[in-house]
Image (cartoon, grey):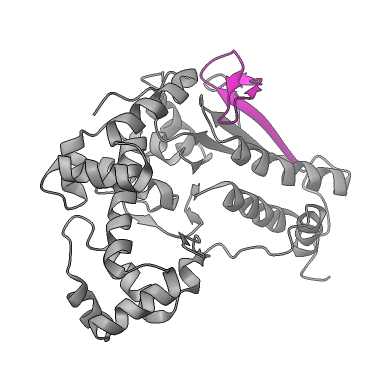
């Protein structure tokens, strides 16, 4: 028999529970369900089943301000093969026994995981201790600040034992294609991928693409890419441009020209923006004070960081946090002032 096919549909559907929180990224939920639905439709069999779960019975509002009906309360569902958390980074469990309930599930064979910001409430349960998590590049600084001892990966998808993390909606779609391949074979997986005009399926170890001016980081010339990555290891303890040039084996002037050619700005300006991007993540996705955030990105004086922040993003950090807290008012997850 062709290795690309599997002979028979499994007798029992692979069951999924998608546990959503207010403000959850809608694209992650639909990217999980739609490939499974298509696989069922194309095979004419119920290969996969799913339920939308929540800690409340009322419809849950998504990031797109669309409400989703809940199929079942999170803690009353019966046997399920996998439970995936889908949420913004600010989400927290209402039930103080949530961690114990999820640990019980894990001990009895349930695969646990998280998509996008769902990695934050999963980490808060303690279930990620001893594991590595895929964290979206936009959440890295906030995650590292809250969970400094938890290792992370830039891989878009990370599977470790019975734990699964996917960094964003595209990664979730690819994860589900791999699940379909494992269940039904490569030929059926390709059919589902083409059903959605999704011709390229990432490997499970594929890295996230990080945006830079004009493209993505992986497409930068090698010396510029190495400099950018070296900058990233010195967010809290700023390094001189001369030292970075020496690290990549270029003169300071040559590095300056390379950055302007590839990114349209000087290495100093790019580095400052990188540090401010990290600060912005913590403004948006943490409850840290302005002083804490400033120190974490190498500023001795919070006022200096706030001034540069306003120049970069058009608002001071206090104003941005208040604005985002207002937008999140629908979720009840407003952040405190800095």
Work out whether residue 151 can be spotted: yes
Percent of width and height locating residue 179: 66, 53
Judge whether residue 134 can be spotted in this image: no
Instruction: Locate the N terminus and report the quarter of the image it occupies.
Output: bottom right
Give left or right: position of 82 versus 300.
right
On the image, which quarter does residue 82 sit in? top right
Say which residue appears at 39% left-offset and 25% top-offset. Answer: 325
**Where does the magenta region start and end?**
48-73
State which quarter of the image contains the C terminus. top left
Q: Is residue 205 magenta?
A: no
Q: Position of residue 128 (x, y in %)?
A: 37, 44
Q: Is 205 drawn above or below residue 67 in the view shown?
A: below
Q: How many marks?
A: 0
Q: Is residue 15 above or below residue 169?
A: above
Q: Residue furthest right?
A: 44
In the image: residue 298, left or right of residue 6? left
- Residue 62 lies in magenta, yes or no? yes
Q: Quadrant of residue 317?
A: top left
Which of the 4 image quadrants contains residue 145?
Answer: top left
């Amino acid at each position: 028999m062709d290795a690309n096919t599997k002979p028979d549909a499994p007798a029992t559907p692979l069951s999924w529970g998608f546990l959503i929180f207010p403000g959850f990224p809608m694209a992650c939920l639909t990217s999980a369900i739609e490939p499974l639905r298509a696989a069922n439709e194309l095979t004419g069999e119920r290969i996969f089943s799913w339920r939308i779960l929540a800690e409340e019975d009322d419809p849950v509002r998504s990031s797109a301000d669309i409400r989703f009906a809940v199929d079942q309360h999170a803690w009353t569902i019966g046997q399920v093969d996998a439970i995936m958390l889908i949420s913004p980074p600010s989400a927290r469990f209402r039930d103080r026994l949530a961690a114990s309930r999820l640990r019980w599930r894990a001990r009895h064979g349930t695969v646990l995981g998280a998509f996008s910001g769902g990695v934050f409430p999963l980490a808060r349960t303690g279930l990620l201790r001893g594991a590595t998590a895929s964290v979206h590049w936009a959440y890295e600084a906030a995650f590292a600040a809250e969970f400094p001892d938890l290792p992370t990966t830039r891989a878009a998808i990370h599977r470790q034992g019975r734990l699964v993390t996917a960094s964003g909606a595209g990664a979730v779609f690819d994860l589900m294609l791999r699940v379909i391949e494992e269940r039904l074979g490569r030929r059926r997986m390709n059919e589902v991928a083409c059903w959605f005009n999704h011709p390229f399926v990432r490997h499970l170890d594929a890295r996230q693409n990080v945006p830079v001016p004009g493209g993505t980081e992986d497409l930068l010339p090698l010396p510029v890419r190495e400099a950018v990555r070296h900058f990233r290891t010195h967010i809290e303890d700023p390094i001189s441009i001369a030292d970075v040039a020496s690290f990549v084996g270029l003169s300071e002037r040559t590095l300056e020209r390379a950055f302007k050619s590839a990114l349209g700005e000087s290495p100093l300006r790019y580095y400052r923006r990188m540090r401010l991007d990290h600060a912005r993540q913590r403004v948006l996705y943490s409850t840290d004070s302005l002083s804490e955030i400033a120190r974490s990105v190498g500023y001795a004086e919070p006022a200096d960081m706030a001034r540069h922040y306003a120049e970069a993003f058009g608002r001071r950090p206090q104003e941005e946090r208040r604005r985002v807290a207002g937008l999140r008012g629908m979720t009840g997850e407003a952040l405190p002032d800095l």
